Image (spheres, rainbow, N blue to C red):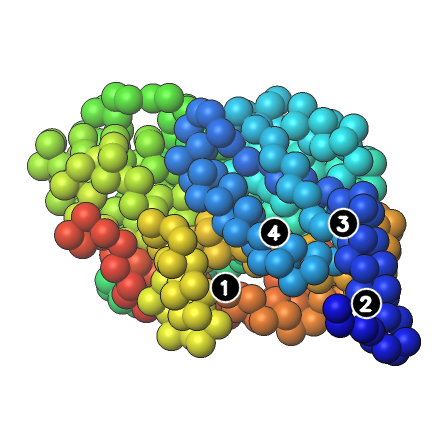
């Protein structure tokens, strides 16, 4: 039988004490509020997967503050009301912070609850400026619509030589309204938005508006909306013989093909990230994530991953789960190397100097066209 020396016994005891303290300590609860049901669920499924992946990596390395991280997954049912209820549930469950949501109208509803309860929140992909203006506990990883609108207006005028544009806005969506205003403001600096029309969530017949657009003959049409209505609009436009280029924002993605079919080909949109961006951290993430998942291509995957990593890094730096301390640590984040870029927050909780990528629909995929830096 092997005998242990006194020093070896001490190390064994210390190891057991450390191991037992990590295993027995209450986990740190991290909330994630996305959509399992409804229109936003097409984006959010990838977000839940990315959050689980990030937490798994963190726990494999020993967790944070010698405690495991427990992901509290909540469904906002793709509505602002569902988002508010999910946020209240997160508060009740005692989370240290919240990641969410994807759509701006959902994140604004969540932010109001969490700001009131002084719980830090990081939105991975909600671009409406009002999200972070809700209060000092609210942050985002993505660029906002002020930048995105400028990017697409400049692209239309410079790369496509557009002089005249029409804008179609979903007045049921804060995201659509905000991005529409930003694009219009920027485009009118050098070109002219000759007509601005709107519709509501769930609309399917756009023939009246498209007939007028055909008569006006603009160079481009900007649809700052998500994939469902945008896809329907472009499909109907092509069936009516309207051949202009359509532009969109980061709400489009490959789901556009589901609603617009082949009519989507040849149009452009802005995105937060693309898996072919020439960056070492991004390439390594895509390689690692692809080993256990079918795809690493969706921008929400990288954005949620970065959100979790920034939040947990802040908890580690705060040295506690005190909400104020975590908020202060998030605000102090400086040159954090994320998958989607280097992250430093400004006074509003927005990341500074985040780049955008412009993608083109080609062969039923989103093809990298160019990167635009601030």
Horizontally, is 94 left or right of 231 in the view? right
Point 75% across, 68% down: residue: 1
* 161 displayed left or right of 288: left
Look at the numbered disc 3 and give the secondary structure of its residue: helix
Q: Secondary structure at mark 4?
A: helix
* Observer-nearest of 338 and 126: 338
Q: How many marks?
A: 4
- Does label 4 or label 3 sit earlier along the sequence? 3
Q: CA distance from mark 1 to mark 4?
A: 18 Å
Marker disc for residue 12: 2
Q: Residue at x 70, y 60 (%)?
A: 62
Q: Nearer the viewer, mark 1 or mark 4?
A: 4
Q: Which residue is mark 1?
A: 340
* Number of residues whose C-alpha sits closer than 10 Å to that of mark 2, classed few (under 14), some (14–19) or many (20 or more): few
Give the residue drawn at x 41%, y 24%: 200
The residue carrying mark 4 is 55
Q: What is the distance, in whole Å, between disc 4 and disc 3 at their CAs? A: 16 Å
Q: CA distance from mark 1 to mark 2?
A: 42 Å
The spot of residue 363 in percent (x, y) is 15, 52
Q: Residues within 10 Å of mark 4 (few under 14, many from 20)?
A: many
Along the line of sight, the residue nearer the viewer: 307 or 24: 24
């Amino acid at each position: 039988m092997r005998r242990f020396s006194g020093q070896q016994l001490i190390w064994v005891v210390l190891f057991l004490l450390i191991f037992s303290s990590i295993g027995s300590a209450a986990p740190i609860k991290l909330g994630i509020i996305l959509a399992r049901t409804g229109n936003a669920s097409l984006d959010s499924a990838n977000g839940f997967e990315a959050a689980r992946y990030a937490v798994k990596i963190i726990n494999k390395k020993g967790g944070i503050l010698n405690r495991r991280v427990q992901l509290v997954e909540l469904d906002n049912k793709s509505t602002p009301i569902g988002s508010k209820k999910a946020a209240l549930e997160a508060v009740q469950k005692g989370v240290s912070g919240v990641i969410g949501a994807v759509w701006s109208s959902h994140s604004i509803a969540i932010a109001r609850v969490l700001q009131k309860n002084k719980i830090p929140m990081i939105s991975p992909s909600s671009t409406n400026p009002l999200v972070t203006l809700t209060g000092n506990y609210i942050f985002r990883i993505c660029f906002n619509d002020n930048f995105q609108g400028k990017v697409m207006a400049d692209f239309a005028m410079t790369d496509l030589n557009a002089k005249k544009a029409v804008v179609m806005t979903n007045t049921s969506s804060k995201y659509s309204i905000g991005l529409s205003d930003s694009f219009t403001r920027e485009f009118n600096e050098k070109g002219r938005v000759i007509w601005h029309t709107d519709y509501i969530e769930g609309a399917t017949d756009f023939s009246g508006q498209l007939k007028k657009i055909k008569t006006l003959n603009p160079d481009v049409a900007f649809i700052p909306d998500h994939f469902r209505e945008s896809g329907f609009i472009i499909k109907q436009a092509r069936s009516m013989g309207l051949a202009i280029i359509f532009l969109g924002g980061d709400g489009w993605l490959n789901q556009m093909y589901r609603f617009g079919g082949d009519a989507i080909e040849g149009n452009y949109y802005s995105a937060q990230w693309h898996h072919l961006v020439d960056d070492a951290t991004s390439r390594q993430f895509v390689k690692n994530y692809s080993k256990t998942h079918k795809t690493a291509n969706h921008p929400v995957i990288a954005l949620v991953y970065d959100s979790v990593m920034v939040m947990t890094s802040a908890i580690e730096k705060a040295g506690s789960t005190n909400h104020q301390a975590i908020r202060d640590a998030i605000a102090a984040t400086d040159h954090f190397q994320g998958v989607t870029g280097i992250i430093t927050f400004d006074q509003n909780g927005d990341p500074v100097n985040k780049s955008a990528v412009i993608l083109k629909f080609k062969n039923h995929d989103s093809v990298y066209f160019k990167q635009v830096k601030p």
